[in-house]
């Protein structure tokens, strides 16, 4: 690949990563802090996964303010802290039946254990 084509490709990757970070940060603000989602969870998850893949392939392009570098957002006023008797676990963006099965399999230490989904 010529240096000009390589630079053009890098510029396109940087532009896409910048776009994804900006969009996801905006969507995260509206979802977590303002309690006013702008897009469905599935769209956020799709964009987030795309950003993760780009950052994995090109770690030198990862940004400090990338939503992949933090969890959630500011806590809304009006919520009380709660201590759960059973740990609250997450599917972590499950997209298929197999991923649900794998998640439940990781939870089940005892075959007789009850899992609440």
Image (cartoon, grey):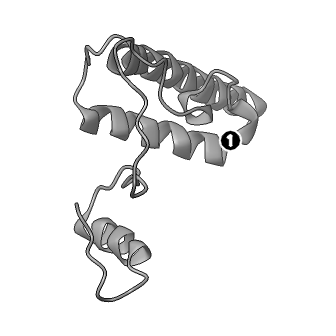
**What residue is pinned by disc 1?**
58
> Can you tell which quarter of the image residue 15 is in?
top right
Q: As displayed, is residue 85 above or below residue 21? A: below
Q: As displayed, is residue 17 above or below residue 60? A: above
Residue at the extreme bottom of the image, as rendered: 111
- Residue 80, image x, y percentages: 38, 24
Q: Nearer the viewer, residue 18 or 31?
A: 31
- Residue 20, image x, y percentages: 48, 24
Few, some or many residues within 10 Å of mark 1 (<14, 14–19, 20+): few
Count every numbered label the image shows and give the total: 1
Q: Nearer the viewer, residue 79 or 59?
A: 79
Q: Going by the image, does 44 lie left or right of 3? A: left
Name the image quarter holding the C terminus: bottom left
Q: Going by the image, does 82 lie left or right of 43? A: right
Q: Going by the image, does 42 lie left or right of 53? A: left
Residue at coordinates 33% horizontally, 89% vertically from top-left? 111
Residue at coordinates 22% horizontally, 29% vertically from top-left? 40
- Residue 49, image x, y percentages: 44, 43
Q: As displayed, is residue 91 above or below residue 116? A: above
- Residue 76, image x, y percentages: 39, 15
> Can you tell which quarter of the image residue 24 is in?
top left
Q: As displayed, is residue 99 above or below residue 29? A: below
């Amino acid at each position: 690949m010529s240096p000009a084509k390589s630079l053009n490709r890098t510029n396109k990757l940087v532009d896409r990563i910048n776009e994804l970070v900006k969009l996801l940060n905006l969507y995260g603000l509206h979802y977590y802090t303002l309690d006013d989602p702008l897009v469905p969870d599935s769209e956020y998850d799709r964009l987030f996964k795309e950003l993760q893949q780009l950052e994995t392939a090109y770690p030198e392009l990862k940004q400090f303010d990338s939503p992949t570098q933090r969890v959630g957002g500011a806590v809304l006023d009006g919520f009380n802290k709660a201590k759960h008797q059973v740990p609250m676990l997450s599917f972590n963006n499950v997209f298929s039946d197999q991923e649900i099965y794998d998640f439940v399999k990781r939870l089940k230490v005892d075959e007789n254990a009850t899992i609440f989904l």
